Image (cartoon, helix red, strand yellow):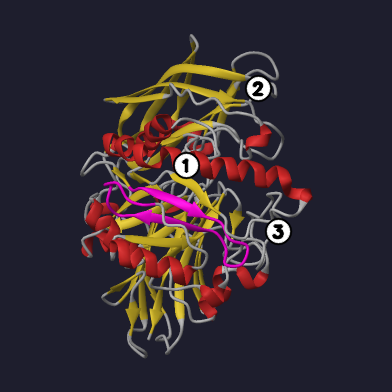
């Protein structure tokens, strides 16, 4: 984030609890095991658009199908990846420590254990000092070993939980809340909230299965918060659209982030750094309320684009839906100026090509308050699919009311996979505001009035040449909402969470409040 972070005037509910969102990725891969892209490059990319990160090594798979010749190629690259992490593990702590910036960018060590029987788990350590790779076969053994070695300085969370039981999806019968205060509900694999989502499981590992979903686990009585992470395999933590976690904490420090994770003050996001926070009385999301108390829910939302709707889900049932277009409740009434979102996307062009974008975006008649990078990495997962370029010279600079950028963007590989690079600026504009985009020596002048009517796009040359798009500017009531929602007081064993969908397809899920 360049410029002003989300201010208290746009997050008064969270600020009242002494909290603000910090954005990160706790599950992603590079070439320290099997994966692509160097560790230093991954850390550099993380610093460019995240507040915290854990770079994950592939470490162990106790029930790997070593006797099945049909998957011998998969076994082979896993075995080699595990051996590589063993060699690099101790030395990689020095590189993590060099990237850590106390108060600004927090790095957590981490690694991954696969399991057909219990599901895959990512282990995260609080401290950046050298620590052991603990390899055990079950969550119960993992809990005992981590507690014995590090006390409360480690936890582990299941990821891509939606795969069927026996195919590396979560095993609810061996899930342990003390080991896993949070779990991953969305990543590049897909979304595990429910059986039917607009982010299905498409990886070769197979589709998702109903009993493996978040709602099923909650209905079984498990308590956990929500994470979103990329599970990116090409050294690009936070790759936009793959997954991201928001942690609500007082500040960006190792101890406060760690406490917030254990108190389930987390959100799972797909891409945009949006804000969704709710409370029942004096209990914030992730907490526990007593039965029969409080008949009102307080909620606030700040989208990264037009908000489509906000849902309240109670024990698996939709009980309330908010459409800001029908129920406008922005944080402040419009005066002579409005606060809005200016989004630029770069890419397109002939398939298999890329373009190095050099340019500036200038705002006249207003003020640029903050800039959020929305950058993506290469879509390479398996080592058998080829390599990914680990070089990254992308640059974003905010100087007054000018954004300078130097970004490489590849063409979209097909008609359904987005590869565009982008940025989103929170701006304050007057009615006569205008935007000037200068790219590759070409100048495009667009009025704010034009962008309030719809998106503006252009190619740099003829058809099939690289192109850009400036998104339409939302009015405050279209990307902000706050208010009180009446609810029946929760009963023993019930749970409730909020989720937000944006018109651009990005999501945000706020961790549940539980009743006990």
**Percent position (x, y) of residue 162?**
61, 63
Instruction: Please report whichever mark, 2 or 3, sits nearer to the chain's N-terminal start.
Output: 3
In this figure, which residue is indicated by the disc labeled 1? Answer: 85
* Separation of residues labelled 3 and 1 (CA atoms): 29 Å
Is 117 positioned to the left or the right of 434 in the image?
right
Main secondary structure of the magenta stretch: loop
Residue drawn 46% across the image and 24% down it: 392
The total of numbered circles placed on residues is 3
For the C terminus, the image quarter is: bottom left
The answer to whether residue 180 of the structure is visible from this angle is no
Q: Name the residue under label 3.
A: 207
Q: Earlier in the sequence, mark 1 or mark 2?
A: 1
Q: Is mark 1 on a helix, strand or loop?
A: helix
Camera-nearest residue between 74 and 173: 74
| Disc 1 packing (10 Å; few <14; some 14–19; many ≥20) | many
Identified at 45% across, 43% down, the residue is 86
Q: Residue at x 27, y 34 (%)?
A: 98
> Measured from the top left, where is residue 513 in percent x and y?
39, 75
**Closer to the camera, 112 or 303?**
112
Front position in the image: 326 or 386: 386
Q: Residues within 10 Å of mark 3 (few under 14, many from 20)?
A: some
For the record, the magenta segment spans 108-132
Give the image quarter of residue 481: bottom left
**Which dot, 3 or 1, sits closer to the camera?**
1
């Amino acid at each position: 984030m360049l410029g002003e972070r989300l201010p208290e005037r746009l997050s008064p509910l969270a600020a009242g609890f002494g909290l603000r969102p910090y954005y990160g990725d706790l599950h992603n891969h590079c070439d320290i095991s099997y994966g692509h892209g160097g560790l230093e490059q991954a850390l550099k990319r993380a610093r460019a658009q995240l507040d915290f990160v854990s770079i994950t090594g592939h470490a162990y798979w106790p029930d790997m199908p070593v006797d099945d010749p049909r998957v011998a190629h998969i076994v082979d690259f896993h075995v080699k990846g595990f051996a590589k992490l063993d060699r690099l593990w101790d030395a990689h702590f020095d590189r993590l420590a060099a990237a850590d910036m106390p108060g600004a960018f927090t790095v957590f060590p981490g690694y991954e254990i696969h399991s057909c029987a219990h599901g895959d788990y990512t282990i995260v350590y609080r401290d950046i000092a050298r620590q052991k790779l603990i390899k055990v076969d079950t969550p119960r053994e993992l809990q005992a070993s981590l507690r014995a070695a590090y006390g409360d300085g480690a936890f582990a969370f299941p990821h891509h939980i939606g795969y069927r039981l026996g195919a590396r999806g979560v095993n609810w019968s061996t899930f342990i809340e003390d080991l896993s205060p949070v779990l991953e509900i969305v990543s590049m694999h897909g979304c595990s909230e429910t059986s039917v989502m607009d982010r299905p499981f498409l990886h070769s590992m197979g589709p998702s299965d109903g009993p493996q979903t978040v709602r099923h686990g909650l209905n079984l009585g498990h308590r956990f918060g929500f994470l979103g992470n990329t599970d990116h395999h090409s050294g690009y933590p936070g790759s936009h659209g793959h997954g991201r976690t928001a942690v609500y904490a007082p500040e960006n420090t190792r101890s406060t982030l760690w406490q917030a994770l254990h108190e389930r003050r987390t959100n799972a996001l797909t891409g945009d750094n949006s804000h969704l926070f709710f409370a029942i009385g004096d209990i914030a999301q992730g907490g526990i309320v007593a039965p029969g108390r409080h008949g009102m829910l307080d909620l606030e939302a700040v989208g990264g684009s037009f908000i489509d709707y906000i849902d309240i889900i109670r024990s698996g049932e939709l009980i309330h839906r908010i459409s800001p277009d029908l129920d406008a409740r922005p944080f402040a009434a419009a005066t002579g100026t409005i606060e809005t979102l200016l989004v630029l996307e770069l890419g397109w062009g002939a398939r298999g090509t890329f373009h190095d974008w050099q340019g500036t975006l200038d705002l006249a008649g207003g003020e640029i308050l903050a800039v959020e990078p929305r950058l993506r990495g290469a879509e390479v997962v398996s080592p058998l699919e080829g390599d990914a370029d680990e070089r990254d010279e992308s640059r974003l600079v905010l100087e007054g009311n000018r954004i300078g950028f130097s970004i490489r963007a590849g063409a979209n590989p097909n008609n359904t996979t987005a590869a565009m690079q982008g940025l989103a600026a929170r701006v304050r504009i007057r009615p006569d505001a205008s935007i000037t985009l200068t790219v590759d020596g070409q100048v495009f002048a667009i009025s704010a009035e034009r962008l309030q009517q719809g998106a503006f796009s252009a190619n740099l040359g003829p058809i099939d040449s690289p192109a850009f798009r400036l998104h339409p500017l939302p009015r405050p009531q279209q990307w902000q909402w706050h208010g009180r929602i009446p609810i029946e007081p929760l009963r023993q064993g019930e749970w409730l969470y909020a989720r937000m969908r944006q018109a651009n397809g990005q999501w945000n899920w706020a961790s549940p409040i539980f009743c006990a």
